[in-house]
Amino acid sequence: MADDKTELNVDKMPEPKIAPGVQVKSLDLPTNPVVVLLSILVALATLCLAYVAAEIVLPIVLALVLKLLFQPAMRLLEKLHFPRTLAALLLILFVFGAIVGIGGAISGPATEWAAKLPEGIPRLQERLKFLNEPVKALQTFLHQVDSFMQQGSATSGGSGSTIAATLFAGTTHFAASFFETIVILFFLLVSGSTFLKRMVEILPNFKEKRQVVELSQDVEKNISAYLVTITVMNGAVGLATGIAMWLTGLGDPVLWGVAAFLLNYVPIMGPLLGVGIFLLAGLLVIDRLWLALLPAALYFVIHVAEGEIITPVLLARRFTLNPVLVIIALIFWFWMWGVPGAILAVPMLAITKIVCDGIRPLAAIGHFLSGDE
């Protein structure tokens, strides 16, 4: 407006901040509006493909992220003069053995708690009388869903429990996706650098070759550090939570420790869900009300100490992501790929920021993805 005395001085605005240690070299990306529009359409088409072909794309993306997580261990084994194939096989066997062992350890307690839940609804109604109406509405909804699924089973001529069949189908799908991820991960660990070598070979000039190598190394270094740090801290959260639940009388410390470990991979949403789970578990088995609230309170304190104090100090300013965009990424990828998508949302956002920070024409996007320092 003409009478507005406040003017925006574009020349004095700060340039987009580039991540420390990243050497920025332009790749001469196209600036033609038509080409930019086509790039946007290609990105949208890629997202559509990721949604439609999720059963294929998701294991590949998960394997790529896990490869970054295990890369430091691969280097350590190679320094110890292990052949690359043997090192990859040892890591795969370690992951598979850990998952099978933990799954076997928590399957029994998880089944027992699942059996307690229907029987504990009257107890919850008694202790939370002010929530009687919502609980009744939930019971009615669950009853209607179960009746609908049973009717669908009768119509299709199926027999047995529809819910059990659905769970079996989900388990089968998970097992297939897990096997695909493990196979892809093994070959990425053995010969993952082949893609980088081929890309460097086909680029036309030395400047672009060097830029690709530097970006690849920066992504691997930063994302590996992020994933290793987060995994170690999640393990500490799981250990502390398991001990706290055992001390409060909730029991099954391995089950609760594993639950806290996994939930902590999903920022914000995971811990909120964890508070609800521990609150529900406490109300189900602990008689005194203030003691029943203690498991959720202790879990919340552990999460705050880890998420707001310890982990930020360890990661320093390596990953200062816009919290609003983190929430949007969590919601979007959860809609796209479910729980695995929510777990992969932040690593993928961090990779995008690192790549944008390393390419001058995309530095503004990297700056937009950054949070307050």
Image (cartoon, rainbow, N blue to C red):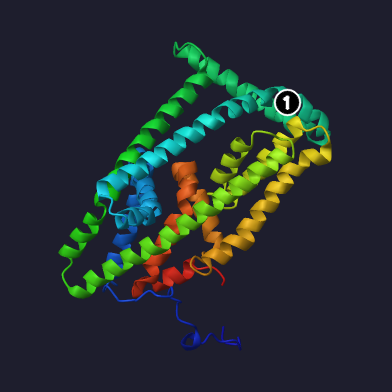
Tally the numbered discs.
Answer: 1
Say above or below: 12 vs 68.
below
Say above or below: 364 vs 153.
below
| Residue depicted at 74% across the width and 33% down the height | 134
**Closer to us: 102 or 40:** 102
The percent position of residue 235, horizontal first and vertical second, equals 55, 48
Quadrant position of residue 33:
bottom left
Near mark 1 (Cα within 10 A), the count class, few <14, some 14-19 or many ≥20, is some
Residue 334 visible here: yes
341 left or right, relative to 85: right
The percent position of residue 367, horizontal first and vertical second, equals 46, 71
The percent position of residue 63, horizontal first and vertical second, equals 36, 46
Q: Secondary structure at mark 1?
A: helix
| Residue depicted at 69% across the width and 44% down the height | 244
**Closer to us: 75 or 149:** 75
61 left or right, relative to 260: left
Quarter holding the N terminus? bottom right
The percent position of residue 225, horizontal first and vertical second, equals 44, 61
Residue 53 visible here: no
Amino acid type at circle 1 is Gly
Residue receiving disc 1? 120
Quarter holding the C terminus? bottom right
**Closer to us: 156 or 207:** 207
139 left or right, relative to 190: right
Quadrant position of residue 179:
top left
**Closer to us: 91 or 205:** 91
| Residue depicted at 43% across the width and 69% down the height | 366
